Image (cartoon, rainbow, N blue to C red):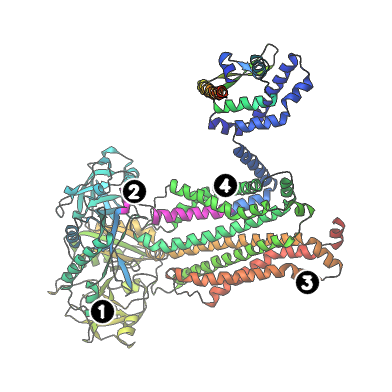
Amino acid sequence: MLKILLRRPGLHGYAIMSMIKDWSGDVLRPEEGTLYPALHRMEESGWIRAKWVTKESGRRARIYELTTAGEKQLEMEESRWRDVTAAVNRVLRMA
Amino acid sequence: MSLWSRIGNVFRRERLSLEIDEEIESHIAEAIEQGRDPVEARRALGPALLLREESRDLKLIPWLDSLRADAVLGWRQLVKRKVTSTAAVLSLALAIGACASAFRLIDAMLLRPLPVAEPEQLYALSHVGIGNDGKPQVFENGEYPLFRLMRSAVKDQAELIAISPTNRTDVTYATDQEMEPAYVQYVSGWMFESFKLRPALGRLFTDNDDLQPGAHPYAVLSHEYWRRRFGQDARTVGQTVRIGNGIYTVVGVCEARFTGTQPGAMTDIFVPTMMHPSVTRSDSGWVGTWARLKPGVPAERVREMLAVIFRVFREERAKGFAGWPKQRLARFISETVLLESAAAGVSRVQRDYRRALVALGILVALVLLIACANVANLMTAQAAARRREMALRVSIGAGRWRLVQLVLLESAWLASLSAAIGGLFAWWSAPLVAGMISSPNSPVRLALPVDWRVLGFGMALTIVVMLLFGLAPALRASGVKPASALRGGDDPHSRGRTMHALIAAQVAFCFLVLFVSVLFVTTFDRLVTQPTGFAAERILTLETVSPRAQSPVFWNQVAEHLRAIPGIERVALAPWPLLTGSSNTSFVSIAGAAPVETPVAFLNVSPGWIETMKIAMIGGRDFRVNDVSPGVAIVNQTFARTYFAGENPVGKTFAMTGNRIPLKIVGLVGDARYRYMREPVPPTVYVPFASVDAKAVAIGVRQATFIVRTAGRDPLALSQTLRREISRLRPEFRVSSIRTQAEINNSQTLRERLLATLALFFAGVALVLAGIGLYGVVDYSVLQRRREIGIRMAIGAQSGDIARRVTTEIFWMIVVGAFTGLALGLISVQYVETLLYEVRGTEFSMLALPSLTILVMAFLAALPGVIRAVRTDPAAILRSE
């Protein structure tokens, strides 16, 4: 999610969800119910910030973007992911 | 998001919910736009309510949110029952306010450290001597030469500072005519530096201002005096002021926080000790010795060192005491020396009022407990009414702690509302009480700041109060068993037992408060109504000073002239008025025997003084104009009884020790109080005002008091005329103080008046509160047992029987409470004994009065409930069931 927001700041919830589906080629299908609590938790942690915008349809939408703290967090998560996958890969190669 | 925004969100949760809902709605709208089925989209998202709760709890602090919700609920509960809530808040407010007020006074008088550097290092020296009444008495003041010896002896262990008591003195600025009273304190030059005080203006004293006797005519003003007297005029420095016979230059103003070293009194003018007239005298004790211990030096070691110097000095002095009884002499030399912490200052007011204030503090604490018991009973009764509500809350999943919180928050509302009102009450009443113990001539000036000490006490008190009356009902509410509560309750009596125990406690405390206040009121009454032996009404006393000693002849001439002023009946002279605490004492020996054990009180009076004071003349004659002292004497009955076995002493002689001329008794008068109201009339010897020395030369007098009996009712009406006349007749004479004798008498009973008034007030409050509590409990128990009473009446019980059933238990509670109170009272009477006057705690009336009052109160309080019980209509009750 953070990655998405890094690339494409200013997305609302539904768009984020669709994006995850698209990017992962439908492999990752996030549970819709967990989306908002996750977003709000990240907002609470200060990784992302939100603001209200009015869309063309007249409906207000809450869009999110990454904060500096969020970028750092993303970097950390990515490097951790790389470490983990690398480790897993090594194990798989040995087998 | 920051903590603050989360706290902020607690108070805007409605908006928060709306925003979360809106975001979810917008999600669904988006889904529909993408062509998804609305129902499917919603289902995919899950229950909206759950989402909202989950997100909201993330964005705020859940416990704070629940606290807020419960606070709102508690407030609604209070508002719902306006009358009971108001009664509870007001009674608590009164009690909390009284407690806070008492704390302010006790703190300001006894606890608050002096606003100087390292007050905990300060100690004050005192010695235990024998007072005029023959009992041990603590003296703080000593001779300056002794202070010098002590200072050099312990200079490596402690820095000694000489500080005299603050004394009301007449001072004059600019013109020599306008005298005004000011409080003057003689202090060592190095005191300000040692206390690390800074000047607000000009400079303070240094070591160099305190070197040679009489050589440093400088004065430092206190900030408060500078503000009050000079309006903070910067030109005050450099002004001259006449104090006594010296002219001083004001060199500076001390910073505001320091008001002197005596709680209860404030210093206006500081003067170096070297300027005191008795600074070189070894026979005049006037100055207090303070010690600032060097770090790590134990106080006991310094005390021992000082005690040695004290003894040597006393031995030297005793060599000059001819004719003292041996035992007295030995005691004089070996008096105990004390070195006690003086962090909170040292003062007479402190000593006089310590016990009284603590006793009052305990009284108000008891009143607070009674008020708390009331509210606890109220809460218990309400908890009973809300059992179903509580049970319901538990059934639908409320935690026990949440219920405790709910009830405690309601208590917190009550407590904080009461504390707020009580705070206002304390703010208003503490200075009022300080004013009550203050008389025009000895004002009690107390710094009563509202600072963290007072606020902290208020907060702590509020929390304690809240827990006192709220915790038990809260725990009880949380312990509710939903099944049985919803079914209709299993033990209707358990609650009644708590309430009854609280009633017993209330009655016990109430009894104690009543008992102690009866003691105080009786003390005051006996003190005021006891005979003084003289008539105080219409007497005006004019204390008059002269820069040089004047022959007694001149003083008599002035008195003679004053007699001619219209509206004046009699004028007499004495060194001081009666009941001012001043006295002369001397040992006497009767018929050549060894000197008597206790010194006898002496007073020099002019002819006509006995008549002016309306003291009963029993035998012999008054002094004549040509009588001089020593030579003749008039004695009182106690003297005759003590030393002449009650025989008529007129015509007999006795001797003053150290004086070879015998005194011939020419008159016998009735007993009159001399120094203090509380002191038994001492054996008193009156001698002529005019004294002569060994060569029969008249001894000049520097200060004396004109005692004037006026014809008019208000003696003060003549004060200006008399003041003017005295200065006109002898320009050197200046009247320094004018007081009526009645005022002097009153100032002797200030403490007793204060105790009696306040104790009576709190006894009234305690009685009313206990009465309300009792009324509530009887009423409640009648309500609870409505069904039982209805059935009993239906099957033929008589009214008396019902009344007995309703009241028996409560009656026993009152008896238990009263006896507990009685026991507490008899224990506590030892503590207040020194405050009492000719009153014993075991006197019948002391015990009967509170018991009767409590019984009457209980009767009146229980009556409405009982009437309600016997008027119960069984048909109506049974029908409603």
Residue B605 visible: no
Mark toward the viewer: 1 or 2 = 2
Q: Quadrant of the N terminus of chain A?
A: top right
Q: Considering the numbered disc 1 on the image, is that residue within a helix, a strand or a loop?
A: strand
Looking at the rendering, the stretch of residues picked out in magenta corresponds to B92-120
Q: Chain of mark 4?
A: B
Q: Which residue is mark 3?
A: B800
Q: Which residue is mark 1?
A: B633
Q: Dot 4: few (<14), some (14–19), or many (≥20) neighbours within 10 Å?
A: many
Labels 3 and 4: the sequence-earlier one? 4
B137 lies above or below B245: below
Q: Considering the numbered disc 3 on the image, is that residue within a helix, a strand or a loop?
A: helix
Labels 2 and 3: the sequence-earlier one? 2
Work out how far the residue at label 4 is from the one at label 1, CA to CA, in angstroms: 68 Å
Q: Dot 2: few (<14), some (14–19), or many (≥20) neighbours within 10 Å?
A: some
Q: Residue at x 47, y 56 (%)?
A: B102
| Predominant secondary structure, magenta span | helix
B812 lies above or below B292: below
Q: Which residue is mark 4?
A: B416
Q: Which residue is mark 2?
A: B115
Work out how far the residue at label 1 is from the one at label 3, CA to CA, in angstroms: 75 Å
Residue B810 x/y as whole percent: 68, 67
